[in-house]
Image (cartoon, rainbow, N blue to C red):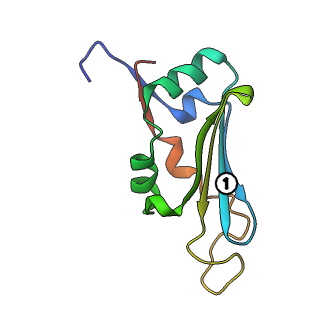
Amino acid sequence: MNSTQSSRTLRELAKVVRSKNSGPFEITFDVIFDTEERYNKVKESGVLSEALICRLYSVTPEDIVTLMFFDPARAFKLTLKRAWGQGTVGERDTFGAQQHAPLLTVEIPGV
């Protein structure tokens, strides 16, 4: 990125960035935008990719259940397999409510 290009984080661009339980074996993530312009900029950037998600969450492509943009809701949707079942020994976030944090600092160039 050169000095004339700017970037903003998902925390700055999205109205909602959240994660939540999606059953005993999955966690789902929502990144929801309040304007069509911001949604389209993020979607067109290509930043929210399988490779990024694998790196952020230390998962393989096989661990990704859903990775998509959903135009009617102006939202990016992601569902991952849990590393272990909800409520099992060693499980640290039974509601899945703390897993969205890595997405907050993802930078989107050109916005």
Q: Which residue is mark 1?
A: 28
| Location of the N terminus (image quadrant) | top left
Indicate the position of residue 12 as horizontal and vertical percent values: 56, 29
Residue at 74% in and 61% down: 22
Image check: 13 left or right of 109?
right
Task: Please tell me in which quadrant of the rendered image residue 7 appears.
Answer: top left
The type of residue carrying mark 1 is Thr
Residue 33 x, y percent position in the rendering: 66, 27
Q: Secondary structure at mark 1?
A: strand
Residue occupying the point 45% across, 39% down: 106
> Relative to 95, does residue 1 appear above or below in the rendering?
above
Q: Position of residue 44 (x, y in %)?
A: 48, 23
Q: Quadrant of residue 21?
A: bottom right
User: Eyeballing the image, is 95 above or below 5?
Assistant: below
As drawn, the residue found furthest toward the top would be: 4
Residue drawn at x 43%, y 35% as measured from the top left:
47
The image shows residue 74 at horizontal and vertical percentages of: 68, 27
Q: Quadrant of residue 77?
A: top right
